[in-house]
Amino acid sequence: MTTINNILLLYPRSNEQKDFRFGFSYNWAHIATILHNVGHCVILHDYSVEDFSEESFLNEIANKKIDIAIIEFDTCSLRRSENYIHGHEIIKLLSTQFPQCKIIAYGDYCSITGKNIPFASHTIKQDYINGILLHFACEPVCSFDELPFINRKLLQEQIPFYKHNAYATMIYTTLGCENSCAFCHRHAFRQEYIVHCDNYV
């Protein structure tokens, strides 16, 4: 029998507040959707569009009895240096105040640098979705078409920003690049080229 967890998924703030047309992180939203679909209680925060209050954050962790926190570390090349700094601050805060809470870090920053995130219980550096699902004994996603459509209602209900902007997102039809240009770092964190089929798109 699968244990039901209270899971916090969060995207730390970046240098600049996100413009609505850039939408949300697809990895973050897919992970939330999959874990929600298998019955876990999923709490979402996207601090690129939400204000962060340490007091409110700690109260929420305590009141909602968060078992696991999953935090995305985006790539610094997209002006996300503040994402790393803020994400690290949150992990340190969690590990100090709630040592029983498991902390999973993942993201393009982890892939590019190959480094573990300090104070995180686990750092996932490749295949983020399956790497996280493994921790919950969920079936792996074997093809891009097996990813569910993102549960935008979940975003709209929890983050006021997405009540108005949940549909203003890029269309995400492929991952990876078949080229290996010397000047481009993208091949460092997009190891495989995968696409949705025409019917999915």
Image (spheres, grey):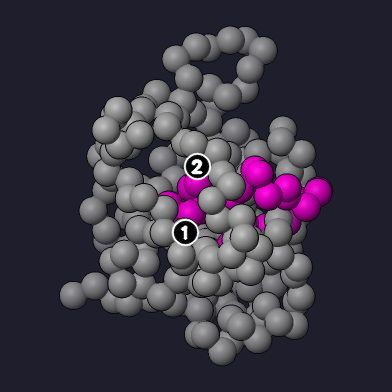
**Label 1 near label 2: C-beta < 8 Å?**
no
Is residue 24 visible in this depiction of the protein?
yes
Callout 2 environment at 10 Å: few (<14), some (14 to 19), or many (20+)? many
Q: Amino acid at mark 2?
A: Lys
Q: CA distance from mark 2 to mark 1?
A: 26 Å
Residue 89 against residue 17 in the figure, above or below: below
Provide residue 105's location: percent of width, then percent of height.
Answer: 55, 55
Answer left or right for 12 relative to 156: right
Which residue reaches farthest left?
A: 1
Provide residue 103's location: percent of width, then percent of height.
Answer: 53, 65
Answer left or right for 56 relative to 2: right
Q: Nearer the viewer, residue 152 or 84?
A: 152
Residue 11 among magenta residues: yes
* Viewport quadrant of the N terminus: bottom left
Provide residue 137's location: percent of width, then percent of height.
Answer: 27, 61
Residue at the disc numbered 2: 125
Residue at the disc numbered 1: 152
Give the magenta range: 9-31
Answer left or right for 33 relative to 180: left
Residue 144 among magenta residues: no
Which residue reaches farthest right?
A: 15
Q: Amino acid at mark 1?
A: Arg
The residue depicted at 69 percent of the width and 72 percent of the height is 93
